[in-house]
Amino acid sequence: MADGLRPVLSLDIGGTKLAVAVVTEDGRTHGLIVEPTRKLEGPNAVISRLFDMGHRAIAASGYADVSAVGISCGGPLDAANGVLTGPLHLPGWVDVPIVQLARDEFGVPAALENDATAGALGEFRYGAGRGAGTLVYLTISTGIGGGAVVDGRLHRGAAGNGGEFGHVMVRTGGRVCLCGRRGCLEGYASGSSIADRAREAVAERGAASALSALPEVRAEDVVAAALAGDALARELWDETVDVLAVAITDLVNVFEPNVVVLGGGVTRSGAALIDPIRARVAADAMPPAAHAAHIELAALGDEVCVVGAGAVAFDHLKVLAGAASREPTHA
């Protein structure tokens, strides 16, 4: 960016962790701090710790101050009014005016965006989607979120919550999702759902599985056991890959993107995830979309939403500057 804006502060509010950093115009993070969310403490306590992390990140970054605050969080939320209306991963967070609270705390403009939408913007501008005209992004983590950039413009939807790709239905009448519907992608392929399905399978029929010996089964345990040849784990992982491939194929057919970027903790499985998905999408998506869409792992890694929130903050500053330049001058 050529306008020389000062760095911004990025606050990413996740169900498992809080991540905070100062972000510069080149997409680099400075003074990054990551701590557990401890969401059961409730919004007041968590936000107090989040803002304290923000001050510590600024102090550690080497920059004297910031020009804006960008906030990313899962939905539902009201980005236009800066309110967390009821994020599914943060029970009890109802109508939290997070943008106004951040403005009051840091004394600079602030902007809110869905975390996966922010991640899509971050990858488009600084990561695996640089140079793409149209990008689809999925974060496969505790839950599954998504976002899209269409012809260079961030897709937000009519009410600002577009891109909820985790709630694409992949199994009609299937597992109950956190959103209350049945059969959502998130109910099968998120990290927490992989672990839940594994625990259920072990309880029902998994005495012979290596997973049965673990005190707590995590998604990464399922991947490791599947790669080691464990039959039950292999079945669970194959279903995970299958539902993801089905959903991504549909998204490729709808958006016809240049690139599909996959991020989040589950993607640490690497080739075990992305290779079969690439093969399935290439085989099942309609041409020419099947041949045009490259499927890539996120380049920004665990910092994707922090960097994305920074991009949101920089864009917000540009909007404010544009509005100021259009205001009439008075003698």
Image (cartoon, helix red, strand yellow):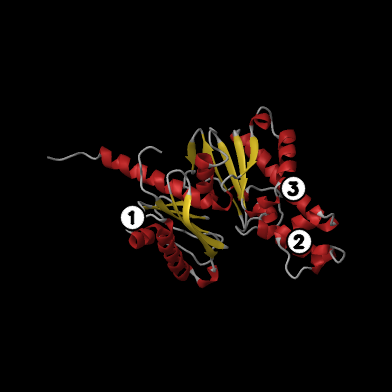
Q: Give the residue number, with chain letter if any, for mark 2.
A: 198
Please tell me whether residue 245 is drawn above or below residue 225 in the rendered image: above
Q: Residue furthest left?
A: 331
Q: Give the residue number, with chain letter if any, for mark 3.
A: 272
- Dot 3 falls on a residue whose secondary structure is helix
Q: Nearer the viewer, residue 57 or 198?
A: 57
Instruction: Tell me the CA gap for discs 3 and 1.
Output: 44 Å
Q: Residues within 10 Å of mark 2 (few under 14, many from 20)?
A: many
Residue 108, disc: 1
Please tell me whether residue 210 is drawn above or below residue 265 in the rendered image: below
User: Residue 205 location in percent, x, y?
Assistant: 85, 64
Name the residue rendered at 35%, 58% in the picture.
Answer: 103
Of discs 2 and 1, which sits in the foreground? 1
- Mark 3 is on which residue type? Ala
Query: Mark 2 vs mark 3: which is more N-terminal?
Result: 2
Name the residue rendered at 71%, 37% in the picture.
Answer: 281
Q: Nearer the viewer, residue 310 or 187?
A: 310
User: Residue 322 location in percent, x, y?
Assistant: 31, 39
Instruction: Tell me the CA gap for discs 2 and 1.
Output: 46 Å
Q: Residues within 10 Å of mark 1 (few under 14, many from 20)?
A: some
